[in-house]
Amino acid sequence: MQLPPVHHHTGLETSGGATRVARLLLDGLARFEVASSLSFELAEKADAMAISPEEFGAGLEGDSIAHIHCTGDWPALLGSIPTGTKVVVTLHDCELFTGGCPYPLDCPVTSDGCAKPCPRNFPEADELRKRKLEEIKRLDPVLAAPSRWLARLAKTHLFRPVKVVPNGIPWPAGLHTKSESRKKLGIHPAARVALFAAHGGMNAAYKSGDTWQDIWERLKKAMPDLVCFAVGGDREERRDDFILWPYVDRQKLAMLMAASDALLYPTRADNHSLVVLEAMAAGLPVVSYSVGGIPEQIVDRMTGMLVPPGDLNQFVDTAMAVLSSRSLGRQMGQEAFLSGRRKFSVERMVGDYARLYASL
């Protein structure tokens, strides 16, 4: 496929969702023999390309495409890009059209402007929002979002069409056996295992990390043989059968998922979660609040269970129903693996973006 060079840009080099998607696209485009590069605003490795938002535009050459995934300063980054440049922006959250919120939740933000004063104390929120909108109008970029939910929201606030390109990840050829993973982790083969996972662990505000232990305690009271992994925090600790893991790499997360019976994901706000896709690729049913783009990933009662947002009691009851029935969990997990392979492969995502680039 004949395409101009594509320069991906993201804020942090850490493996957050936006950065991981950028890396997957970088690798996938190489298979199409498309020259591409990736820069960061905060790089952890000495050989990584670190560049400030104000300097980004000056590094774009010729007919290249700038693909922006996230930044710590939208007005500065967009303002650095010369008018007429081919620009693609993937919205990984809502920050491009808010006064600073990754997700507004119940904030009374409207298409006319932010609430004054900002209920979350973002400084000059409405002015910041207007500056971002002005740069979007000037550059006229192609906008993409991984979920229809975010695409509709962005279209309302940015007054332009938004293409839907669902996230994709590398999909395994088959499922790992639970017995092997549990043996490596020292978990009894007959135990029931629940998994929580989010960047920040029990401090992850948008992922209801503050409720994880409460959910676990309620489940444990009804299911004495239950073991729980809580992944993504800042320490490793074992509290009886409640096992805390810090941030782990993909290989370790895959092992923890393979050893588990369900992913419990009480997220308060989400776009198109890579953690949900990882669980599906591991054959795990997911119990989640029905928010954002999550219903576009999970088919209720087929690949997982959706709960009304914020209903903690129903979340616990639903999680208990999934964890207490091995046959139900196994059936939903297998369907999640098969349907996810059809819809959410990395090859499909790369192909979608390659066609989007070609349309420019």
Image (cartoon, rainbow, N blue to C red):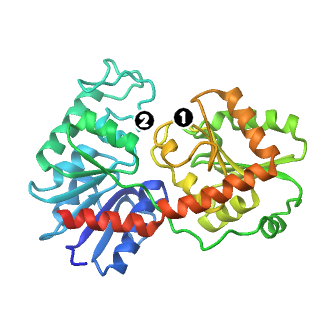
- The residue closer to the viewer here, 209 or 77, is 209
Count of numbered labels shown in the rendering:
2
* Residue that label 2 marks: 103
Is 325 left or right of 208, judged from the image as shown?
right
Residue 131 horizontal/vertical position (percent): 19, 36
- Relative to residue 92, is residue 37 depicted above or below? below
Name the residue located 49 percent from the left edge and 59 percent from the top edge.
Answer: 15
Tell me how far mark 2 sits from mark 1, CA to CA: 9 Å
Pointer 2 and pointer 1: residues touching (CB < 8 Å)? yes
Name the residue located 32 percent from the left edge and 34 percent from the top edge.
Answer: 98
- Secondary structure under the numbered disc 1 in the rendered image: loop
- Amino acid on which the number 2 mark rests in the picture: Tyr
- Secondary structure under the numbered disc 2 in the rendered image: loop
Q: In which quarter of the image is residue 201?
A: top right
Answer few, some or many: residues within 10 Å of disc 1's Cα (few below 14, many 20 plus, some between 14 and 19): some
The mark found on residue 268 in the picture is 1
Residue 314 horizontal/vertical position (percent): 69, 29
Is 255 left or right of 113, judged from the image as shown?
right
- The residue closer to the viewer here, 50 or 348, is 348
- Relative to residue 259, is residue 296 depicted above or below? above
- Relative to residue 150, is residue 313 depicted above or below? above
Is 80 left or right of 311, judged from the image as shown?
left
Residue 79 horizontal/vertical position (percent): 17, 48
- The residue closer to the viewer here, 151 or 198, is 151
- Relative to residue 154, is residue 48 depicted above or below? below
In the rendered view of the protein, which quadrant contains the C terminus?
A: bottom left
Name the residue located 40 percent from the left edge and 21 percent from the top edge.
Answer: 119
Answer few, some or many: residues within 10 Å of disc 2's Cα (few below 14, many 20 plus, some between 14 and 19): some
- The residue closer to the viewer here, 341 or 181, is 341
Residue 337 horizontal/vertical position (percent): 61, 61
Name the residue located 38 percent from the left edge and 70 percent from the top edge.
Answer: 48
